[in-house]
Structures are given as structure tokens and as C-alpha cells.
Amino acid sequence: MHYVYRFRLYPNKEQEKFLNIQIGHCRFIYNKLLEMAKRDYEQEGKKWNYYEYKKLLPKLKKEFSFLKEANSQSLQEAVKWLDRAFKNFFKEAPETAFKEEEGKQEIQDTCKEDSKAPREGKKSKERFSAQVKQANNRR
């Protein structure tokens, strides 16, 4: 069973700077792959393929060294967002647009059971849910 937790963050200046950098990297990947997909379609008639463009992430990290600072799961999630945008486009939705700095800013990361975080079995899950409830009560 998978759980989804949503948090409202109130970061300090240093954390805000870090998050803005992460969001910027995701926006860069989204826009770069969108640019490449549009160019491929116009020049070669090549259609969007999620797996093909996801394979480009390591090459883009080598080409643009600043992407090495980014969380890889967040970059992969940016490719998923672009995939969803293309699927919506072919369902008669508005054209897929480039991401901008203004407006809603978001980043997504995954936390898996096999992550490097220390676990204490059931107790750690209970402690985590207690922290979530406490954070939600602060509103």
C-alpha cells in the first residue's frame, strides 16, 4: 500500500534557495525535452516516446553539469509531467507550454521503503504519521 503525504513548507532563506534551485532544474529538464520533442516532430515526424526521452537524462546531466546537483527522482518526475502533458494534448487539450518561473512552483520526490533512511519497522511509521498530523495542525 502506498501513502501520499502533502506538506505545506515554510522554509528559511537557505532552504528556499535550495528548493528554488531544485525547481529550476526540473523546469529546465521539462523545457529542454519539450524543445527537443517539438524539434524532432517538426524535422523528422518523430512522435513523443516517454522511455526514449527518459533515457536522455544521463546525457543531459553530462552536457549540463549543474544538473548533477539535482535530485534524480525529481528530474524523472519532470519527464513524467511532460509525458502527461503530451497525453493531454492528444486528448484535445490546449497545446503543451513551456514552464515559467512565475505561477505555481512544485517539486516531487519519492520516499521508498528501501531508501537509505533508518527504519525501525512499525514504530517509525507511527512516528512519521504523528509528525505529519502535528505539521497539519499548525495551520
Image (cartoon, helix red, strand yellow):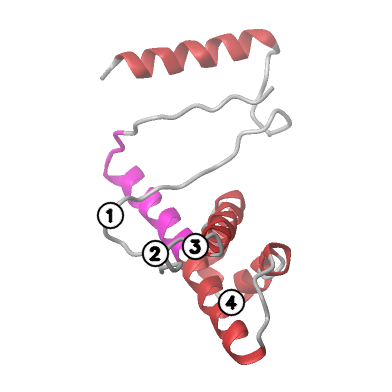
Disc 1: CA contacts within 10 A as few (<14), some (14-19) or many (>=20): few
Q: What residue span does the magenta drawing correspond to?
A: 10-27
Name the N-terminal-most of marks 2 and 4: 4
**Amino acid beneath label 1:** Gly
Determine the residue positioned at 65% across, 71% down.
48
Q: Is residue 72 magenta?
A: no
Residue type marked 2? Lys
User: Disc 1 versus disc 2: distance between alpha carbons?
Assistant: 9 Å
3 vs 2, front mark: 3
Q: Amino acid at mark 4?
A: Ala
The span from disc 1 to disc 4 (Cα, nearest Å) is 24 Å
- On screen, 61 above or below 133? below
What residue did someone put label 2 on? 99
Whether 22 is drawn above or below 118: the answer is: below
Q: Nearer the viewer, residue 136 or 115?
A: 136
Where is residue 60 shown, x and y percent of the image? 61, 73
Given the image, on which type of amino acid does mark 3 rest?
A: Glu
Is residue 130 left or right of 11 when viewed as pictured? right
Give the quadrant of the N terminus: top right
Quadrant of res 67: bottom right
> Where's residue 11, x and y in %?
31, 37
Secondary structure at numbered mark 4: helix
Q: Nearer the viewer, residue 47 or 66?
A: 47
Write down the quadrant of residue 131 in the picture: top left
Q: Residues within 10 Å of mark 3 (few under 14, many from 20)?
A: few
Quarter of the image with the C terminus in it: top left
Q: Which mark is residue 37?
A: 4
